[in-house]
Image: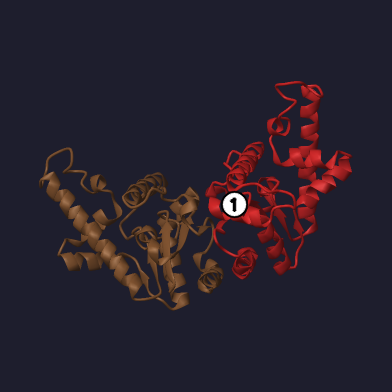
Chain colours: A red, B brown
Amino acid sequence: MKIITISREFGSGGRELGKRLADALGIPCYDHEIIEMIAKENGFDERYVANVSEKSIEAAYPLTIGHRFAMPPMQIMDQSIRVATAQRKIIENFAEQGDCVIVGRCADVILADMKPLNLFVYADMPSKVQRCMERAPEGENLTANELERKIKQIDKQRTQHHQMYSDTKWGNKEGYHLCINTSGKEIKKLIPALVQFVNDWFDE
Amino acid sequence: MKIITISREFGSGGRELGKRLADALGIPCYDHEIIEMIAKENGFDERYVANVSEKSIEAAYPLTIGHRFAMPPMQIMDQSIRVATAQRKIIENFAEQGDCVIVGRCADVILADMKPLNLFVYADMPSKVQRCMERAPEGENLTANELERKIKQIDKQRTQHHQMYSDTKWGNKEGYHLCINTSGKEIKKLIPALVQFVNDWFDE
């Protein structure tokens, strides 16, 4: 079975790479759909789940922890664990259904027993800032400096989230089979080689 | 022009990967040939040059520096600089002659202006030890522990040597375009995807 996980720096084009690779391979790509499924299954507010599922518990509650508690800390913890558990279950379900690409959500660690091919996508800061600017949602007009701060902040949260699952540091090449630098590159130009790589990787 | 540089952890199969990739692309691969050319051009003892060209100055003179000087320190320094200069010149000459693969020797940094494709090849320690055992020169019978020490020692020297040329740390993925984990893999299985990657990379 071909399970491909993609971990990626914010702004590196990792999600686009995942979708294009999955399309080229003719298999599904799971990304924020996962979060939506968690949200539906658990009846949580979708934005809340999106927040927890990629952030550490502390980062998800900047206003409640250490300041004023909207709900008791134990209850927050309990909800976070429920979200994390649901997320893990859904990722496992996806993987069991067959070949797929999963972007983010620590699927590389969660699915380790299934021997996924783990890719890491990264880029230099100017490339990431430029990509974010080109893809900014309507109404978002962040400066380059603001985007750089946002990128660092999100990647820091990804690092923290990864620590919940693994001792290997997020982004350390040792944790991945192939690390792809997308600086100044069009994602679609990388796909044919990656398709070949994936097919040869699982062909034994 | 396609210049591909390969940096590699000792025992990761980087040299084999370089040779196979060059063969598949139909271009030359330069490796220890570089050292031999330096040796001939400069009339140095070949083993001396091999030592300097991949080690820092201190590491190349464990018996002379800090102990008893076989020659005055300034002369040692002078010779090391001459070797490094010759090495750089030869690498530049190779690259100017056309498409090629260059393994090691900090060619990634030396040729930066020529926009090479920089690959990094790595593996986990058990894979590297196993590869070293399979490829041990006749008469070398190191234990797994001894090999692990040797691997760490050589990679430490590569890190130090790289520092002479660049602020980016040797092995940090940010310094490379693609990082390939060969743990438990046959090198030849990786070649078709890399050929595709190289061709698409330079096709713009």
| Residue displayed at 71% across by 32% down | A57
x, y (%) of residue B67?
Answer: 15, 38
Left or right: residue A81 compared with residue B167: right
Please say if A186 is above or below B69: below
Quickly name the residue at label 1.
A129
Which quadrant of the figure has residue B52? bottom left
Q: Is residue A105 visible?
A: yes
B149 and A123: which is toward the camera:
A123
Chain letter for mark 1, please. A
Residue B181 visible in the picture: no
Pinpoint residue A156: horizontal percent, then vertical percent: 61, 39
Query: Is residue B86 shown above or below B72?
Result: below
What number of labels is visible?
A: 1
> In this view of the protein, which residue sits in the foreground, A185 or B28?
A185
The residue positioned 26% from the left and 46% from the top of the image is B59
Residue B191 appears at what percent x and percent y? Answer: 52, 69
Q: Residue B111 occupies which quadrant of the picture?
A: bottom left
Residue sitting nearer the eye, B139 or A198:
A198
The residue carrying pointer 1 sits among few (fewer than 14), some (14 to 19) or many (20 or more) residues within 10 Å by Cα, namely: many
Q: Amino acid at mark 1?
A: Val
Q: Secondary structure at mark 1?
A: helix
